[in-house]
Image (spheres, helix red, strand yellow):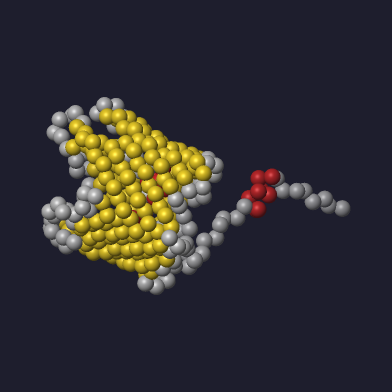
Amino acid sequence: MATLVPPPPAAAAAETIKPEKVDYMDLPCPIPYEEIHREALMSLKADYFEGMRVDFTKGLNQRFSLSHSIAMGPTELPSQSAEVIKIPTANYEFGANFIDPKLMLIGRVLTDGRVNARVKCDLSENLTMKANAQLTSEPHMSHGMFNFDYKGSDYRSQFQLGNGGLLGASYIQSVTPHLSLGGEVFWAGQHRKSGLGYAARYNTDKMVASGQIASTGMVALSYVQKVSEKVSLASDLMYNYMSRDVTASFGYDYILRQCRLRGKIDSNGCTSAFLEERLSMGLNFIISAEIDHMKKDYKFGFGLTVGE
């Protein structure tokens, strides 16, 4: 009677491991073209500030709320010398917010005369209109922008229209479950300039890698590694092949039960840290610090956020 000989372990493993079959007719919808570096920006570009800041938000009902912001601290003045010149300033900002599942209205008024407004409206399930504007008393500093975003099953497209004859369009397409490719084109009529750009993004459950290049000379690369559910490491590289300027940075994002700590260090010798501590429900304490060793510029700020 013949006996059956079991296959070698390597052969058995080869039979059980099958390549993942990709359904190219059912690819995921990518994120918007302008947000391909989203994870890296959240870790490396925190809202650093200097001085003291207090933000208070009061909800009047489920959709409408009012906000008050007070900021006191130095402001840097442009200077041709290496020395950093700062003057003390203080600002108060009043805001009104209306947030609905299909409509968002946000307005801000500052004591220096600036008025900011943002609108987001879902015109349909796939089409969204966004608008933002800033009005100021300074000549030629007011601006406005309209964005129309269309979300397909596995692609996104966007059209931009701004003052000064600014026209722009972008498109991003998922080519595999993890890889998306896109491009953009813009025309600035006031300055008689045009440009093209291309981007790629590869993401998994543990990492995100993005790259972007434009005819204006800008090259942007970013990489985010998710070490655990609470810890992420991020790095980016900004290079302009026309001016030969290059900057690289490395940072971390650590989320604890009651706080979130972010920090970074870049190739210019600037080290930053940003801490958000939840003291109680609706009350957060913020600490911001930056040290620029090259310019000998040191910034420290603290603040409170009251309300949700």
Q: Give the image location of residue 169, x and y in percent.
A: 27, 63
Measured as percent of width and height from the top left, residue 292 is found at 29, 30
Q: Position of residue 101 (x, y in %)?
A: 44, 66
Q: Is residue 66 above or below residue 256?
A: below
Residue 229: image location, x then y, percent: 54, 44
Write down the quadrant of residue 100 in the picture: bottom left
Please tell me which residue is depicted at 17% across the width and 58% down the height of the picture.
188
Instruction: Residue at 51%, 64% (x, y): give it.
Output: 23
Q: Is residue 268 left or right of residue 11?
A: left
Q: Nearer the viewer, residue 239 or 60?
A: 60
What residue sits 47% from the left and 40% below the top? Answer: 277
Front position in the image: 45 or 179: 45
Residue found at x 18% / y 37%: 77
Left or right: where 113 falls relative to 129: left
**Snapshot quadrant of residue 89:** top left
All told, the count of numbered labels is 0
In the rendered image, the residue lying farthest to the bottom is: 124
**Is any part of residue 183 visible from this angle?**
no
Residue nearest the viewer, comparing 177 with 76: 76
Q: Is residue 71 above or below residue 84?
A: below
Q: Is residue 146 above or below residue 297?
A: below
Residue 205 can be seen in this image: yes
Residue 34 placement: quadrant: bottom left
Q: Residue extending furthest right? A: 1
Q: Is residue 307 left or right of residue 214?
A: right
